Amino acid sequence: MKRLPPILQIGEILISSDILTEEFCCNLNACKGQCCIEGDAGAPVTLDEIGEIEESLDEVWSDLSASAQAVIDKQGVAYTDQEGDLVTSIVNGKDCVFTYYDQLEIDGGTVDHCCLCALEKAFRNGKSRFCKPISCALYPIREKQFSDGTVALNYHRWDVCKDAVEKGRELGLPVYRFLEGPLVRRFGQEWYDELCTMAKELRKQGYID
């Protein structure tokens, strides 16, 4: 197989080639949503998203823990982390304030005590127009913006998601295919179609299996 360049580009979007070659599919049966409660900072958010989250608070408040409510009352729905990025507020140094626990019916079975998103629940129930931060929806893709307007998309590797990698390989599901919905939401259908065309051409040329 030919050697694929590490960085590809569509417009002003730089794309790590891992996004085309690595395979991934969330496996909540195995991880139970650990990505919402592990780590040392909240999910990256924009100022516009903070406004939408604040508008959704009344709809999600009853699903939040007393500790999460106390954090929001004290510092709001977001804060600036050590790297200077705006992120969702967290509880006890790790849990996103918008997490809650419930049973989840998936793949014909029940996952007990699964970590879920109160914002997404309200959206799916038609109670809110805001689903969840795009940074959450795009994971395991991490987005970085530069001052010149360029955006870089990188594939993030995390032990928490090892079962998702295994499931993705079983299904033969590349990261960019798994994240079709979030990528279209963030960059538009035309851009995503260009990404798929690029992947198809690279496969034809022997750069991708």
Image: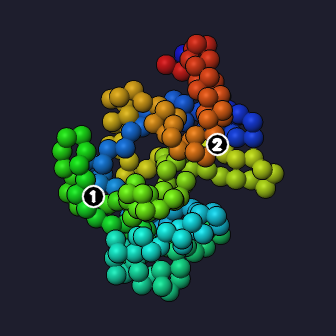
Label 1, secondary structure: give it: strand
Would you say 180 lies left or right of 62 here? right
- Amino acid type, label 1: Cys
List x then y, in percent, for residue 126.
42, 57
Query: What is the count of numbered marks?
Result: 2
Residue at 53%, 79% (x, y): give it: 76
- Amino acid type, label 2: Phe
Residue under pointer 1? 114
List x then y, in percent, for residue 165.
38, 39
Which one is earlier in the sequence, the residue at label 2 or at label 1?
Answer: 1
> Could you say which is closer to the camera, residue 54 or residue 168?
54
Residue under pointer 2? 187
Q: Nearer the viewer, mark 2 or mark 1?
A: 2
Please tell me in which quadrant of the rendered image residue 80 appears: bottom right
List x then y, in percent, for residue 138.
52, 48
List x then y, in percent, for residue 189.
61, 35
Say which quadrant the N terminus sits in: top right
Label 2: how many Cα within 10 Å (few below 14, some 14–19, many 20+): few
Label 1: how many Cα within 10 Å (few below 14, some 14–19, many 20+): many
Residue at 54%, 71% (x, y): give it: 55
> Could you say which is closer to the camera, residue 157 or residue 185?
185
Would you say 56 lies left or right of 193 here? left
